[in-house]
Image (cartoon, coloured by chain):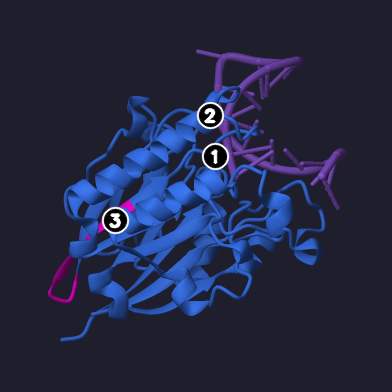
Amino acid sequence: MSDACLLTTWNINSVRLRLPLVARFVRERNPDILCLQETKCRDSEFPFSGLRELGYEHIEIHGQKGYHGVAVASRRPLGPAHRRDFCGKGDSRHIGVSFSLGARTIDLHNMYVPAGGYEPDRAINPKFGHKLDFLDEMAAWCKAADTGARDCILVGDLNVAPLETDVWNHKAMLTVVSHTPIEVEKMNRVIRQGGWIDVMRKFVPPEKRLFSWWSYRSPDWLTADKGRRLDHVWTSQSLADAVAAMDVLKEARGWERPSDHAPVTVLLKA
DNA sequence: ATGGCTGATTATATCAGA
């Protein structure tokens, strides 16, 4: 028996404000599983009914007031959720669930890595230090959980653009948080320790530019195209052949009152 | 390579985003 699952990750930048955009995306793409980041609301304020009306009966969230927050909304049943408190800060940057694909049970991790502030120096910018520590903890956690040897998917706004073609100008971005060598090195270590496959780059070769985020500060974001690939989909090696398609819905960045991130969608086949 | 915008908050300025 064959099974297919469409899965989307999207930094929505306030799920309450942009529920109409979620609805529009669902009308156009209709994913089975929707992973959101920067929901920016407490669990008690989450728009459960709005998502249920869109057909997502299985919802697991990890929210907090005003900032961060992640959610998984699914048409299929989800296994028990767990919420890891990376760096022991009590913030809401991870939710783990599981779902079935054919005969498999797949662990799904939805994450929001700290942005890291402006100055790429942990001595003067604690937010950058937090980001580096977070990536170190991610690497240790992936290794301990043996994600590479299981059926695992990790998605989210990881706030690092690792390849030269993941930013609009590699040289200019070397000192800009999200593309500094130390961040890239630490992200690559997470990928190595976790045995992950960078799925987006299986479909768009490293020679080609690929972005998922465009700053609000550029009114001509489309023509300037000064984007970055901050959003990611990683799978374990066991799922390498299960990912049949991937796309970034860039046009969603041009919708009315958009998120600054575009949704990234993958098709999984069992 | 700089300057630019958006959302949430017991708000009318501040912080965070990246």
In the rendered structure, which amino acid carries the disc numbered 1?
Answer: Ala
Q: Is residue A158 above or below residue B3?
A: below
Q: Is residue A172 above or below residue A205?
A: above
In the rendered structure, which amino acid carries the disc numbered 2?
Answer: Lys
Chain for disc number 2 = A
Q: Is residue A226 magenta?
A: no
Mark 1 nearby-residue class (10 Å; few <14, some 14–19, many ≥20): some
Q: Give the left or right position of residue A52, taking residue A249 as reference.
A: left
Residues shaded magenta: A101-109
Q: Which residue is mark 2?
A: A127
Chain for disc number 1 = A
Percent coordinates x, y for residue A43 in the rendering: 36, 34
Q: Colour of chain B?
A: purple
Considering the whole magenta stretch, tell me its main secondary structure.
strand
In the image as oriented, which residue stretches furthest toward the bottom? Answer: A1
The local secondary structure at tag 1 comes to loop
Q: Residue at x 18, y 63 (%)?
A: A149
Q: Pointers 1 and 2 in contact (CB under 8 A)? A: yes
The N terminus of chain A appears in which quarter of the rendering?
A: bottom left
Mark 3 nearby-residue class (10 Å; few <14, some 14–19, many ≥20): many
Q: Earlier in the sequence, mark 1 or mark 2?
A: 1
Write down which chain is painted blue.
A
Give me the C-alpha separation between circle 2 and circle 3.
Answer: 24 Å
Please state which of residues A252 and A174 is positioned toward the viewer in this rendering.
A174
Q: Indicate which disc residue A194 carries.
A: 3
Q: Give the left or right position of residue B14, taking residue A35 as reference.
A: right
Q: Which residue is mark 1?
A: A115
The C terminus of chain A appears in which quarter of the rendering?
A: bottom left
